[in-house]
Amino acid sequence: MSPCPLCLSNSAEPLARDARRQYLICRGCRLIFVPPEYHLSIDDEKKRYALHHNTPNDPEYVRYCAGVADAAMRLPLPPRPRVLDFGCGEHAALAGILTQRGWECTACDPLYSIGGDALRRTYDLIIACEVLEHMHDLHAGLIAVGRALASGGRLMVRTELYADESGLVSWWYAQDATHVNFFHASTAEAIAGLIDGDVEHSDRKNTLVFRKTG
């Protein structure tokens, strides 16, 4: 049985299976995850992302990113925060919006070779918008993000949170083959531990905010 990719415990057990893949649930942190043998290759992931219209030319996507930017700009941050858009995507639309609004925002996405050294610097805010559900090495990735957060800095996560594990297979969020991690509101505590911080806000729907305390 695969260990939990978030907390690394061996308390995962089978939850469900659909026509494409198996889902396990960690009874420690409540992360639901897809075992590595069912993950898409990098090339297949890129082909799937290419079907999206997540570009600055798509009005609906720009409205979505603007809403994320609005939420970020309401956080208690320094007047001119250093911001990282982690997992920005090929077109880095959110980073572009924040930059237009006068924030210093760095774009980073290893999948597209964007901002390869970005995690070597520190930031007052790191935004991971629709990113964590895709990550194949969740534990190592969050540790790297935590190291890049300045003390007192915030990590803002956008991902759909599940409420009832029994409905996973029919949940629309699980229909995307690139989604391999599914979070419950209580899973936030495990994320907080990896970034040396605490949970500052959860809407128990799709938004989590963490504050680095270490």
Image (tube, rainbow, N blue to C red):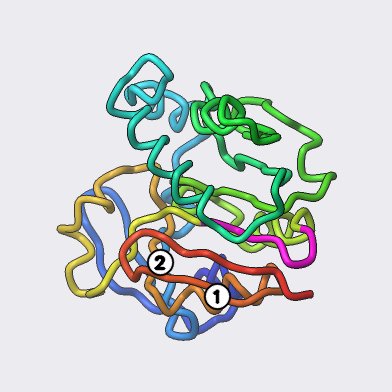
Asked if residue 154 lies in the magenta stretch, the reply is: yes
Q: Quadrant of the C terminus?
A: bottom right
- Counting from the top left corner in percent of width and height, residue 198 is at 61, 77
Secondary structure state at the residue bearing disc 2: strand
- State the residue in front, 172 or 145: 145
Earlier-in-chain disc, 2 versus 1: 2
What's the residue at 48%, 41% (across, down)? 69
Is 71 positioned to the left or the right of 211 in the image? left
Q: Position of residue 93 (x, y in %)?
A: 49, 26
Query: Which quadrant holds residue 111?
Result: top right
Graded by Cα atoms within 10 Å as few (under 14), some (14 to 19) or many (20 or more), the crowding at tag 2 reads many
The numbered disc on residue 183 is 2
Residue furthest right in the image: 120
Task: Using a 10 Å C-alpha cutoff, classify the residue at mark 1 as few (fewer than 14 neighbours), some (14 to 19) or many (20 or more).
Answer: some
Where does the magenta region start and end? 150-156
Above or below, 87 relative to 23: above
The amino acid at mark 2 is Phe
> Pointer 1: what residue?
199
Estimate the spatial distance between the alpha carbons at disc 2 and disc 1, rounded to whole Å.
14 Å
**Image vertical order of residue 191 relative to residue 104, above or below:** below
Verify whether residue 136 appears in magenta: no
